[in-house]
Amino acid sequence: MIAEGLIALVGAGVLLAVAIAVPWLKFVLTIALAKGIAVLGILLLLRAGQVSFGHAMFLATGAYTVAFLAPAMPEALLLIPLGGLFAGLLGLLVGLFVVRYRDIFFGMLNLAISMVLYSLLEKLYHLTKGTDGIRVARATYAGFDLPRETQEWLMFAIALGLAALFGTLVAAYLRSPMGRALAGIKTRETRLEFLGVSARRVLLFAYVASAVMGGIAGTLVALTTRHVTPLLGYWTSSGELVFIAILGGAGSAVGAFLGAVAFELVRVYAAASVADAWQMILGGVLLLVILFAPGGLWGILAGRLKVRA
Amino acid sequence: MSAPLLSARGLKLAFGGVKAADGIDLDVMPGEFLAIIGPNGAGKTTFINMTTGYLKPQGGRIEFAGEPILGLSPRAIVRRGIGRSFQLPQLFTEHTVIENAALALAAHAGIWSPFVPLLRPGYRAAAERLLDRFGIAHLTETRADALNEGARKLADIAMAVALEPRLLLMDEPTSGVAATEKMQVVETLVRVLRAEGVTAVFVEHDMEVVARFADRVAVWSQGRIAALGPPEQVLNDPAVLRDVIGIAGHA
């Protein structure tokens, strides 16, 4: 865990240096950190052997919380936890249903429910402005209305701080009895029941935690891009989170951020150089990772540094 | 005479036309070691599955310590003091042996903090003590899927014992264990269970193990109990020898 922490610290330092050296990249890196936080939630579910193809619904919940509440209450330091709270409540509601199912049924039910939310965001035009989306009102930070440049730096710092916070919490959780029981769902769910433990409750805790992280990520995306659309909750966005989780590697919380940063950078540079084929490049990268580095980018890094992946 | 710890009456369960339990009546007395023998398909594992809430009988009743337990979930039954081990050990294969043991101890203690390490010093020591009693303390850091069958069986039973059960149901604790290790495995677990005062019911195909360690033997045949009594009596019964042991011995 100490080695993992050191790698995370070095990684944070590198991100900060890149953001200083190439200022326009801090927008991309803030989005990457936000997505990394959402991917931490996917990672939790992967530990239980479950894949959610609908987790973008929580990201969209967080983002729309900001969009709806910002005009009346523009304080970012309140909007961020509120987005997490609403996503967590939705996670509890959906989770009570989906944790009864496993494998393909779990994945597809998440997808189906997320598409219901997507449709609502798209169709309830008078509330959501449909596919046009909502322009997010300018936020204040601890009551201060900051200039744009300062605001961008602050969002980067908040994203980095929250990434460190949730990364640490997830790493601790995965080592706790609850986290080890979560991994037990993947291998021997029957044994958990015969230990007197409710596998559903163990999975529900992880599910709600993952929803909260998805919601927080959504608030960061909304506050950074200042424009939310239903696309944030579309199934391709959910697939993107799973993509990043596999790319980064499910073996460590650091993997989520490695994957997210790599994904966003490849996307930006691939889109700039081969505008029509950037998705193919991303697909190729994922294929290479699956074939030659099943532990993802974290697996490669941990192998090189001799850290237990 | 003391009251039975487990009492089953008229248990019935059929899978299609196959009667896995056809009116099972059985009392298990506190502190005894009861062996269940019989050919494959006789309904031995079905009895364990019904008693632990994994299968629901179509008729009959089961009482544990005087309380009805029929219809309760496996979790609720475990919490009342009935543990079980499995013919195919149900270990968390991605975890190490000590993590398996510590998880069982945590489950029993109801400690589910999501932010405290499973293997914090106090827990590690308790898990090591548990594994030491089963003679597998040297395997603490081995992943469960890398164990040999004897160690897997002992780890599986250790996890059940971590819950401090009053009654332990063991499904073929020696199946798959190398002949050279078999007696050592049974001696180890019997020593621990006797020391803990755990009542045990175990399904077994090895008659030498049954003769040596069982206080009573129940002979299962086509969902019924064909004979019940001390091993020296049951294992010398000509009908049992002919109809059951002859088959079971080759199962």
Image: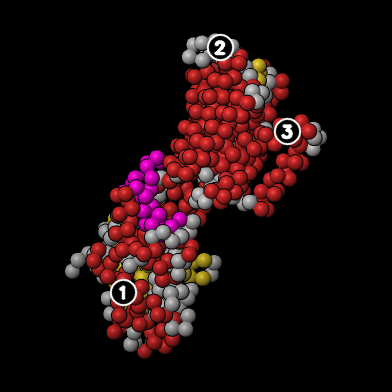
Q: Considering the image in quadrants, where does the N terminus of chain B appear?
A: bottom left
Q: Nearer the viewer, residue B184 or B210?
A: B184
Pointer 3 local density, CA inside 10 Å: few below 14, some 14–19, many at least 20: few
Q: What residue is shown with label 2?
A: A146
Residue B86: x, y in percent?
A: 43, 65
Residue B30: x, y in percent?
A: 24, 66
Q: Tell me the element at label 3.
A: helix
3D distance between C-alphas at marks 3 and 1: 66 Å
Range drawn in magenta: B95-120
Tell me the kind of residue under disc 3: Tyr
Q: Chain of mark 2?
A: A
**Residue displayed at 80% across by 35% down:** A274
Q: Tell me the element at label 2.
A: loop
Pointer 1 local density, CA inside 10 Å: few below 14, some 14–19, many at least 20: some
Q: Is residue B113 magenta?
A: yes
Quadrant for residue B192, please give it. Answer: bottom left
Residue A302: x, y in percent?
A: 54, 48
Q: Tell whether B84 sits left or right of A252.
A: left
Q: Chain of mark 3?
A: A
Q: Is residue A291 magenta?
A: no
Q: Tell me the element at label 1.
A: helix
Q: Nearer the viewer, residue B121 or A194?
A: B121
Pointer 2 local density, CA inside 10 Å: few below 14, some 14–19, many at least 20: some
**Residue displayed at 63% across by 44% down:** A247
Q: What residue is shown with label 3?
A: A269
Task: Kindly report which numbered mark, 2 or 1, lies closer to the viewer in this rendering.
Answer: 2
Tell me the kind of residue under disc 1: Glu
Q: Nearer the viewer, residue A162 or B4?
A: A162
Pointer 3 and pointer 2 on the same chain: yes
3D distance between C-alphas at marks 3 and 2: 30 Å
Q: Is residue B209 visible?
A: yes
Q: What residue is shown with label 1?
A: B187
